[in-house]
Image (cartoon, grey):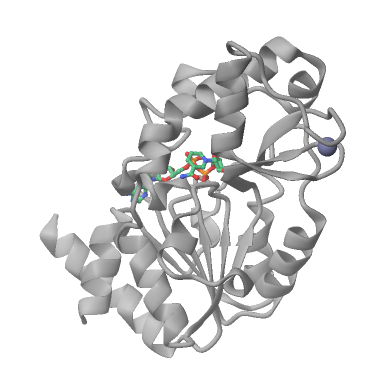
Amino acid sequence: TGDDIKTSAKALAAVLAGMKAGVAFTGAGISTECGIPDFRSPGGLWSRNRPIDYQTFRASPQMRAEAWRRRFALEPALGGAKPGRGHRALAALLAQRRLQAIITQNIDGLHQASGVEEEQLVELHGNSTYASCLDCGQRYELDWVRARFEEGQGRAPDCASCTGPVKSATISFGQPMPAAAMARAGALSGACDVFLVLGSSLVVWPAAGFPLQAKRAGATLVIVNREPTELDDLADLVIHADIGDVFEAALAG
Ligand code: NAD
Ligand code: ZN
């Protein structure tokens, strides 16, 4: 209700006012108001399709084609999305230097679209707005992949330089986590005064280890999520509400 939002926003504003070196950790919930469904809410992406894991993608040309079909089917939602109120609030806190960085599990590129610089952003699960070769790392734009896909009548394209499989630049289940991003996220989590979780169910590991690490290192842990999360019991402030509503109200003062 409106009163609950006001009370929550006040508590959040108090934490933000004292924050000097915060870190935000974002999940799919920050992008749902932008028209991109999350995974685990009813109607979310997983209720429709079982994810294709890394080994399957590598091994099977059919599943590679299926993965690209699904990716192109998401393009109307992903390609047209604009940053939401949560993205804009975090960009403002970064500009004020109260926040040092954002660690994200998202692959939608919306933090960049809100003006966040690469050195302020850690992408744990990669980025779906471009592709790369799994063998040589060569980068490809989606338009290139789509053109090859259509020329080949639905066959997934291979790398033009080494013939390796070309995959969306996201991290799939079974794929190693990006080492540099993991190291940066660990360093940030261990050295922040406030750790803000926004829109993550905190069930995917190792990503969910970062809030835990921050809390153990003495940070104030804040969780803003519509539903309860795995780490609510540990948090200093838990707000079960819409991210956009709460941040809008908190930053309005
Ligand atoms: P999740 O789907 O497991 O959890 C999202 C959480 O956000 C849910 O608990 C839900 O209650 C909450 N939520 C949804 N809308 C909200 C709102 N407006 N305000 C407050 N809370 C809201 O997502 P996850 O924890 O990020 O993990 C899923 C994995 O899926 C991640 O690894 C990510 O890479 C990937 N993913 C990314 C996107 C994206 O890039 N936008 C979308 C779907 C999935
Ligand atoms: Zn290659």
Where residue 241 sits: x, y (%)? 29, 54
Which is more toward the observer, 191 or 173? 173
Kindly indicate the quadrant of the structure image that contains residue 145. Answer: top right
Where residue 218 sits: x, y (%)? 64, 78
Instruction: Tell me the quarter of the image containing the C terminus.
Output: bottom left
In the image, 134: left or right of 47?
Answer: right
Kindly indicate the quadrant of the structure image that contains residue 53. Answer: top right
Residue at (60, 69) in percent of width and height: 118
Where residue 90 sits: x, y (%)? 41, 71
Residue at (12, 60) in percent of width and height: 2
Measured along the vertical axis of the image, is residue 131 above or below residue 99?
above
Farthest-out residue, front: 151
Residue at (43, 61) in percent of width and height: 113
Q: Is residue 18 visible?
A: yes
Where residue 211 sits: x, y (%)? 61, 62
Q: Is residue 50 visible?
A: no
Instruction: Tell me the quarter of the image containing the N terminus.
Output: bottom left
> Total of numbered circles in the picture?
0
Measured along the vertical axis of the image, is residue 97 above or below residue 41?
below
Which is more toward the observer, 18 or 30? 30
